[in-house]
Image (spheres, rainbow, N blue to C red):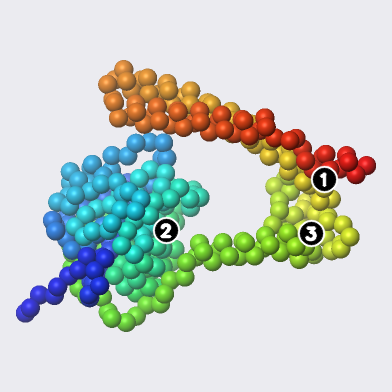
């Protein structure tokens, strides 16, 4: 039988299931090592890996996977072209997303308390590559990956979940299986072989629905709500503002002549008083940021010095870079505060008296 021609993810003719996205958390290093060890050299698919790791810690996951796999592995770079037969690892403190033909890295807001998170990778893969995607959820805590796996299945892709009974931490794969569903629930030892078989299959020409860009939709909703607030169209409704005293939601009262807010526990503000309180809290928050950046610089330099004594050059350089960046941010924020014009809202209230 004549073999089917395969194309890279950027190719135009009859691509197969050539995008594999993998997410793991606690216990993930060993699980990922075992998974990639079973993938053959020249695999006609690109593999993308997200592992929950602390933001400030240097990651050696790519080195570990390169050692254990026949496929080359490296930390992904922003704008890097997607090629088959390679493993792309999300770097610490960056979400990794897939766009048609290339990788995108961004320090966006944390999702599920982590960055990198699994859901951004899975969602973006489903949007960009649809039926060509194979999503894999391995061992870990909490729920990250479940919504992303739902997006992959909705787009016609395939979901592979590690058998919770086989996982070091069963919460993440169990949640993915029970909520998103899975086409395959397998012990870790069987996943690599299944991935190779799936890559060798052509996806159905039809099936699946386009995955909406949830982030874009959310931003539209937020933008619309802010515009309504600014133009006074949310009187008698929940506002987009929060109470400075308790952090609760503020409700705008139905008063056309006055801008007034109450929170659900009873704190009450005129608009001018709320603006003054926000200004005070903002300055306090900025001074807190200055302190924290300065403390981070001191601690990072202490860790760098210790690394130098131990002749650990690479970690020392990373710590020194973090210290220099922390100093830069602290100085910029402090200068912003000192050059400010004071409490504009309070000045406005005084002028009106």
In the rendered structure, find residue 119 and report the number of the disc placed on it: 2
In this view, which residue lies farthest toward the right?
353
| Residue in view at x 29 percent, y 46 percent | 75
| Residue in view at x 53 percent, y 33 percent | 329
Question: Residue 284: image x %, image y %?
Answer: 68, 34
Element carrying mark 3: strand
In this view, which residue lies farthest toward the top?
309
Say few, some or many: other residues with alpha carbon within 10 Å of mark 3 (under 14 / 14 to 19 / 20 or more).
Answer: many
Question: Residue 62: image x %, image y %?
Answer: 26, 44
Mark 1, mark 2: which one is toward the viewer? 1
Question: Residue 294: image x %, image y %?
Answer: 53, 26
Which quadrant of the view contains residue 129?
bottom left
Element carrying mark 2: helix
| Residue in view at x 23 percent, y 42 percent | 64
Question: Is the C-beta separation of discs 3 and 2 under 8 Å?
Answer: no
Element carrying mark 1: helix
Which corner quadrant holds the N terminus? bottom left
**Rounded to the nearest whole Å, what is the CA distance between mark 3 and mark 1?**
14 Å
| Residue in view at x 38 percent, y 23 percent | 304
In the rendered structure, find residue 309 and report the number of the disc placed on it: none
Q: For residue 27, say whether it is visible.
A: yes
Q: For residue 192, say whether it is visible.
A: no
Q: Nearer the viewer, residue 241 or 333?
A: 333
Read off the residue under disc 3. 252
**Rounded to the nearest whole Å, what is the CA distance between mark 1 and mark 2?**
40 Å
Which of disc 2 and disc 3 is earlier in sequence? 2
Read off the residue under disc 1. 273
Question: Is the C-beta separation of discs 3 and 1 under 8 Å?
Answer: no
């Amino acid at each position: 039988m004549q073999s089917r021609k395969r194309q890279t993810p950027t190719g135009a003719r009859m691509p197969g299931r050539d995008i594999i996205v993998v997410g793991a958390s606690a216990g993930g290093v060993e699980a990922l090592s075992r998974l990639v060890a079973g993938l053959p050299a020249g695999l006609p698919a690109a593999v993308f890996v997200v592992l929950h790791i602390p933001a400030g810690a240097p990651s050696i996951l790519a080195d570990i996977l390169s050692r254990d796999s026949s496929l080359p592995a490296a930390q992904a770079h922003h704008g890097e072209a997607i090629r088959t037969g390679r493993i792309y690892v999300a770097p610490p403190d960056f979400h990794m997303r897939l766009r048609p033909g290339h990788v995108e890295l961004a320090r966006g807001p944390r999702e599920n308390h982590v960055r990198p998170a699994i859901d951004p990778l899975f969602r973006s893969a489903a949007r960009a590559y649809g039926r060509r995607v194979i999503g894999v959820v391995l061992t870990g805590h909490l729920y990250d990956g479940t919504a992303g796996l739902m997006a992959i299945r909705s787009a016609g892709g395939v979901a592979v979940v590690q058998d919770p009974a086989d996982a070091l931490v069963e919460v993440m794969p169990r949640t993915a299986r029970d909520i998103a569903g899975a086409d395959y629930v397998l012990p870790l030892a069987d996943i690599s072989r299944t991935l190779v078989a799936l890559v060798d299959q052509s996806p159905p020409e039809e099936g699946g629905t386009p995955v909406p860009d949830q982030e874009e939709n959310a931003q539209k909703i937020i933008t619309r709500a802010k515009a309504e607030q600014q133009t006074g169209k949310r009187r008698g409704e929940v506002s987009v503002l929060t109470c400075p005293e308790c952090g609760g939601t503020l409700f705008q009262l139905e008063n056309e002549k006055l801008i007034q807010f109450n929170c659900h526990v009873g704190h009450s503000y005129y608009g001018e008083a709320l603006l003054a309180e926000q200004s005070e809290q903002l300055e306090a928050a900025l001074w807190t940021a200055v302190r924290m950046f300065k403390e981070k610089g001191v601690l990072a330099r202490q860790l760098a010095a210790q690394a130098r004594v131990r002749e650990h050059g690479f970690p020392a350089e990373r710590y020194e870079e973090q210290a220099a960046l922390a100093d830069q941010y602290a100085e910029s924020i402090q200068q912003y505060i000192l050059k400010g014009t004071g409490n504009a809202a309070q000045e406005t209230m005084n002028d009106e008296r």
